[in-house]
Image (cartoon, rainbow, N blue to C red):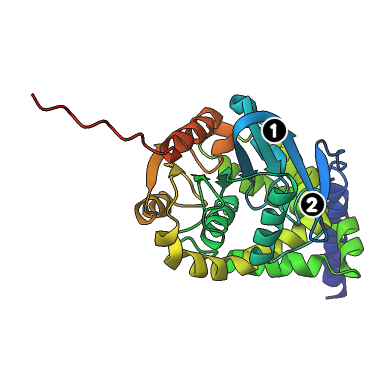
Amino acid sequence: MRRFLRILLCVVAALALAIVVLNWTYGRLPGEPKPRGSFVTVDGVRIHYIERPGGGTPVVLLHGLPGTAEDWNEVTPLLAGRRTIAIDRPGFGWSGDGYMKFHRQLEVLRALMQRLHVQRPIVVGHSYGGTMALGFAERYPGQARGLVLVDAAAAGTHVASFERLQSHFVNFLQLPVVRPIANATFSQLLRTITANIVDAEAFDPQPVAPAHKHRVLAINMTSGNLKAYAGEELEANGVFDRIDPRLGSIDVPAIVIQGEHDQLVKPVYGRRLAAELPDARLEMIHGGHMAPYTHPYTVAAAVGAVEQASRPRTAQPPKRRA
């Protein structure tokens, strides 16, 4: 019996050592890069954003959960000539630190637009950024000229119990006493494996974009971003339950871009969202959840289509009678 226990302890110790070694080799997270773009403090919150100058209707771009302003790097060059502002939503990227409630994010977003003199933009939102775009248009009628909703989480989307349990565990790992111990022993490995699995699911059936994979590991796996991620996951179902009954009141031109193979926001929800918005058009695309990377031309074209749809129609002169 004692011999068996000694062998068992040796095996456990070997496994623990292997995990620690993997944690600092395969799982070791890359260093956080330097931000590019600009910072501004609004309502006491430091916001990071990337702006491209231009004219016409401005375009505000909101990333998903998690994400950064650089998730739009493939889209904004295709909007050359337009003013674009891609934002690190509060808590993500280099904006603030930790979780901010949904309604408070909308307040900060509006304050940021006012600070940057952005009037009636086209708001483009991906995934939970699409939820934010819907919330903004509903809460501030007349403030958005139109919406481009890319694999937007709404119209029946819900966070499953397993994901909510994961978020509680993420919060536990960010506790001041737990975090340094976990980081030194196993949490880098856990974060790397989890990020790779979720990225593969999000991009499927297309390959994962290397730039996105690197940003997730280098930026979104930092403590503040993880707190923001967990907080939004735990709040999301309540947000969906408040917004979904009000979709019919969001009467602005909208294009809903939905991946046919999206595993994170199922196609049924994209179709339902387009059907419930008063002035929306559905565009189904071949692919998964990451259209800003896999279909940037489709996203850019939708911006132009929404702007065209939002223009007042010129009255036709009456026909002369013969």
Mark 2 element type: loop
Taking depth in this image into account, of 35 and 39 the one nearest to the observer is 39
Vertical side of 157 occupied by 207: above or below: above
The quadrant of the picture occupied by the N terminus is: bottom right
Task: Give the residue displayed 53% in from the left and 40% down from the top.
Answer: 204
Closer to us: 257 or 219: 257
For the residues bearing labels 2 and 1, Cβ distance under 8 angstroms = no
Residue 317: in sight, yes or no? yes
Q: Position of residue 40 (x, y in %)?
A: 82, 48
Query: Gap between marks 2 and 1, in whole Å?
Result: 23 Å
- Which residue is identified by label 1? 210
Horizontal placement of 112 versus 181: left or right? left
In percent of width and height, residue 92 lies at 75, 52
Mark nearest the camera among 2 and 1 is: 2
Q: Quadrant of residue 6?
A: bottom right
Q: Relative to residue 29, is residue 179 depicted above or below?
A: below
Residue found at x 87% / y 53%: 20
Q: In the figure, residue 139 lies in which quadrant? A: bottom right
- Residue beneath the point at 51% across and 64% down: 158
Q: Nearer the viewer, residue 237 or 308?
A: 308
Image coordinates of residue 278 in percent, x first then y, are: 37, 53
Q: Earlier in the sequence, mark 2 or mark 1?
A: 2
For label 2, the crowd category at 10 Å Cα-Cα, with few meaning under 14, some 14 to 19 and many 20 or more, is many
- Residue type at mark 1: give it: Pro
Q: Is 123 positioned to the left or the right of 189 in the image?
A: left
Q: Position of residue 154 (x, y in %)?
A: 48, 58
Mark 1 secondary-structure assignment = helix
State the residue position of label 2.
95
